Image (cartoon, rainbow, N blue to C red):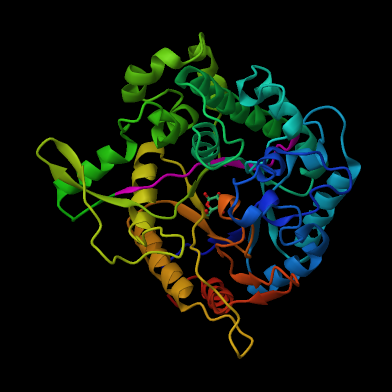
């Protein structure tokens, strides 16, 4: 058997990328509403105002999930939809939306997997200093309490943060994520530390209010993979995986900087030696809060890079010309789903769920009315075989979520990158399951034996 008997097969999305209804039913603004409004930030001036209109079409989408056969659906909650100002006043219509979605999922036999934060920070709190404000962990705890109190009777599976390195690195080091600012190292280190504290506080609140919950967090990274099976190359990749690169704020992109505090209760020594000077005074006393025991370690993995043992330590191997790449230009490296989970399991000893994996393709509707996406099927097939090899070698992998269930707003790339198992016509909002949808459905049915 390739995968454990009760392996959790799922698919994932996030609030801003699919919901739309950006200014409806009392939702507050968030930093993505604001970022998209700045000229030149998003390809073709796109935004998530309508997205795929999941807010109004969630019933149709849940029916498609049922047809697909997923056991779990990972989605995120829009913080400002339920707390328009980030804290304080609750928006009942926002609560109703998620409550109805959860009921619809349960009626379809699909487990709701809630991600608390997938990048859409309330604008009201951003104007009050965002993660740089020392009250920000408490704001997040308040939001978590509202989620737990309203949905915790039916939803039991939670992820606190999605990819902190992306929203802090991409959003706060002047790259192309909201809020699109660039902070100096000390401010950035303090903001990251506040995110870690917010994570710890959220876990505590979830345990208190939903005692039978399962909670984890979902970072991402580009796994370092050995260029060969030689033990020296494996050791070089293991080292490179968690090592800090030369950039002056590289801690923000480093998997150990984020996950060692959460999983091991300490910042990594190499990072402390270089960046410890930037941490806020008294950070040591927060480590216990930050390292609340988790039920699982969730990880998003898309692609990695190869490393070999060089004379002066690990060396990056350049990819050959004409290598296979996705439409977005990401390298196709199935080994990432073997080495990523393996190295993370060795370090953190926690059950692992792959909470995102997938690719964008130049999908289109063919003359026969169908969407043929053989490249996506091939990608998933290869990556899942690698994952099954990790299972075989003793890595405790409990589930896998395809990114994405459905085409959606791909952040700064707008609607130009299609990651879904379901195609969306952005003019009519009509949904068409792609060939990969039917193929993935068979994977789920056979528990991966058809790979
Ligand atoms: C994010 C998703 C995004 C996907 C593809 C992940 O980093 O969590 O929101 O759509 O990658 O870029």
Measured as percent of width and height from the top left, residue 13 is found at: 63, 56
In the image, residue 204 sits, relative to residue 156, either above or below, namely: above
Name the side, left or right, on which 336 lies relative to 75.
Answer: left
Q: Residue furthest bottom?
A: 368
Measured as percent of width and height from the top left, residue 8 is found at: 56, 60
Q: Residue furthest top?
A: 281
Query: 346 and 363: which one is in front?
Result: 363
Measured as percent of width and height from the top left, residue 106 is found at: 76, 60
Q: Residue 212: which quarter of the image?
A: top right
Query: 409 and 289: which one is in front?
Result: 409
In the image, residue 68 sits, relative to residue 163, either above or below, namely: below
Name the side, left or right, on which 391 lies relative to 165.
Answer: left
Q: Residue furthest left?
A: 311
Which residues are the magenta region? 209-224
Residue at left 65%, top 51%? 14
Residue at left 27%, top 42%? 238
The answer to whether residue 378 is seen in the rendering is yes
The answer to whether residue 142 is seen in the rendering is no
């Amino acid at each position: 058997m390739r995968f454990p008997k009760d392996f959790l097969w799922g698919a994932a999305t996030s609030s801003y990328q699919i919901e739309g209804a950006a200014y409806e039913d009392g939702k507050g603004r968030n930093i993505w509403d604001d970022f998209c409004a700045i000229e030149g930030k998003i390809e073709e001036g796109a935004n998530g105002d309508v997205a795929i209109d999941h807010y109004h079409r969630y019933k149709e989408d849940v029916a498609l999930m049922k047809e697909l056969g997923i056991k779990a659906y990972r989605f995120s909650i829009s913080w400002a939809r339920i707390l328009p100002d980030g804290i304080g006043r609750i928006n009942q219509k926002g609560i109703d939306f998620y409550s109805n979605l959860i009921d619809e999922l349960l009626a379809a036999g699909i487990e709701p997997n809630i991600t608390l934060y997938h990048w859409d920070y309330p604008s009201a709190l951003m104007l009050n200093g965002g993660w740089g404000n020392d009250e920000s962990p408490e704001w997040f705890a308040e939001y978590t309490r509202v989620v737990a109190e309203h949905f915790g009777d039916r939803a039991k599976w939670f992820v606190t943060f999605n990819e902190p390195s992306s929203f802090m690195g991409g959003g706060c080091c002047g790259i192309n994520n909201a809020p699109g600012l660039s902070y100096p190292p000390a401010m950035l280190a303090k903001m990251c530390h506040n995110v870690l504290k917010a994570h710890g506080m959220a876990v505590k609140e979830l345990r208190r209010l939903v005692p039978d919950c399962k909670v984890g967090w979902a970072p991402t990274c580009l796994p370092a993979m050995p260029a060969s099976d030689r033990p020296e190359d494996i050791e070089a990749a293991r080292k490179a995986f968690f090592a800090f690169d030369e950039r002056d704020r590289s801690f923000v992109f480093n998997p150990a900087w984020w996950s060692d505090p959460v999983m091991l209760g300490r910042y990594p020594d190499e990072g402390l030696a270089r960046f410890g000077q930037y941490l806020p005074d008294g950070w040591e006393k927060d480590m216990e809060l930050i390292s609340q025991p988790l039920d699982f370690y969730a990880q998003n993995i898309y692609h990695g890079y190869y490393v070999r043992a060089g004379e002066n330590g690990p060396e990056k191997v350049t990819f050959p010309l004409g290598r296979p790449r996705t439409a977005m230009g990401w390298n196709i490296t199935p080994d990432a789903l073997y080495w990523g989970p393996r190295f993370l399991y060795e370090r953190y000893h926690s059950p692992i769920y792959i909470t995102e994996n997938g690719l964008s393709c130049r999908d289109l509707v063919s003359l026969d009315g169908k969407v043929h996406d053989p490249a996506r099927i091939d990608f998933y097939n290869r990556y899942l075989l690698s994952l099954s090899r990790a299972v075989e070698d003793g890595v405790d992998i409990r589930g896998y979520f395809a990114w994405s269930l459905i085409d959606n707003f791909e952040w700064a790339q707008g609607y130009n990158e299609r990651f879904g198992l379901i195609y969306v016509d952005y003019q009519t909002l009509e949904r068409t399951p792609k060939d990969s949808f039917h193929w993935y459905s068979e994977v789920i049915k056979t528990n991966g034996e058809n790979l």
